[in-house]
Amino acid sequence: MEIKKKDIRALTKEQLRNFFVEQGDKAFRGNQVYEWLWQKSAHDFDAMTNISKETRKMLEDNFVINHIRVDQMQRSSDGTIKNAVRLHDGLVVESVLIPTETRTTACVSSQVGCSLDCRFCATARLKRMRNLNPDEIYDQVVAIDNESRLYFDRPLSNIVFMGMGEPLMNYNNVLKAIDKITSPEGLGMSPKRIVVSTSGVPKIIKKMADEEVKFGLAVSLHSAIDEVRTSIMPFNATFPLKDLREALEYWYSKTKNRITYEYVVWKGINDTQEAADALVKFCKFAPSKVNIIEYNPIDNGEFQQAPNSAIEMYQNTLERNGITVTIRRSRGKDIDAACGQLANKS
Ligand code: SAH
C-alpha cells in the first residue's frame, strides 16, 4: 500500500529538527532543510545541494513539497502583471504585481473563491472552495518578488491582501504566511509594508488588536449606512456597522494605527451628501484615510461608477472634516487584474 506522503512545509522548524533527531541525524539538518524550503524556495529535494543524496532520498520517500506553479502570466499595457497560480490540487487563484515609480506591490489571494458575497465583486461569484495554506500565500509573494526583480530590476516593496478571498476568514493561515514573509528566515520584509484588507469581521479585528500585529489594516466599507451596505454586501446583516465600528475603536485604542477605508462611489447607491456625511461620522473617531477606488465593471451595468462630481463631493466633505482622501485609478484593467475582477477567467 502506498503511504500518503506529508507536506513538508506544514512542519514548523522545531518539528523538522525533531524529525531529523528521530532519524538519528542532527537537529541542525532540520535548519538546513528549513532554509531550503523557505528562504531559498526549493521546489524539489534534489535542489538541496548541501544535503547528502541518501538524506534527500529519505525525504523524498516521506514528504512532498507542494509548490505552487505560475500557469499563466499576463502583462497589462500599464505594466501590471497578473499570475494565474495553480495549486497542488489543481485549483487556481490569481495574484497581481502592481508597479509604480517608487514601489512594486504584490496583491495576493487568501482563499480559493471567497466566503463573502459582495454583489459588485467577480470573486464572490466563485464561492469559497477552500482556504489557502500559509505556504501557498507565501509562494505567491515569492513569485511576484522574482518577477519584480526580473522585469523591474528591484525587489518587491509592498504587499496587500486584496486578491481573492477574505483574509480574516482565513486568519490563522494569513498570519502564519505573514510571519514567514517578515521573518529573516523567509523574505525578511517589514510588516509595515503589508496591508490586510477586510470587509470587516469584528471578532477577528479585535483578535488582531489583542495580538498587537504590526501590519496595516484596510476596511472595505463602501457605505456607512447599514441598509445600503447590507444591500450591496449582504453579510453586513451578520456583522452590522455598529459591531464593525466597535471593533475598529478597539483596534485603534490598542494599536494607535491610522485606519484606511476603501470606498467605491456608485451611481444611485451611495453618491449623495447624506452618504458622505455618514462616512465622516463613521470614521471620525480615529485618524483615518479614505481611498476612493474606481469601480471596475463586472456585470451588465447593475453597478455604475458615479460621475466625477460625486467623487469631488466626497473629497470635499472628507477633507473639510480632516480626513485624508486619495483617489485611486484602477491598474491592469485590460487583463482583468483590477480590484474585484479576479475570477479565473483566462
Ligand atoms: N475581501 C477583502 C479583500 C479582497 S477585495 C476585502 O473585502 O477587503 C479588495 C478590494 O476590492 C475591496 O475593497 C473590495 O471591496 C474591492 N472591490 C471588489 N470588487 C470591486 C470592483 N468591481 N471594482 C472596484 N473595487 C472592487
Image: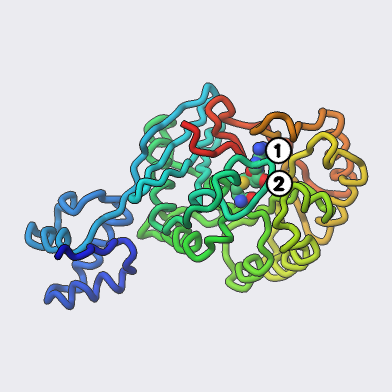
Q: Residues within 10 Å of mark 1 (few under 14, many from 20)?
A: some
Callout 1: SS: strand
The reply to whether callout 2 and callout 1 are in contact (CB within 8 Å) is yes
Q: Amino acid at mark 1?
A: Ile
Q: Amino acid at mark 2?
A: Glu
Q: Could you tell me residue 83's position as x and y percent?
A: 44, 36
Q: Judge: label 2 CB < 8 Å from ligand 1.
A: yes
Which quadrant of the figure shows ligand 1?
top right
Check the image and name the residue furthest to the left: 54
Q: Judge: label 1 CB < 8 Å from ligand 1.
A: yes
Q: Which disc number belongs to residue 293? A: 1
Horizontal relation, residue 82 to residue 12: left or right: right
Q: Quadrant of residue 242?
A: bottom right
Q: Is residue 146 above or below residue 214?
A: above
Q: Could you tell me residue 220's position as x and y percent?
A: 69, 50
Callout 2: SS: strand
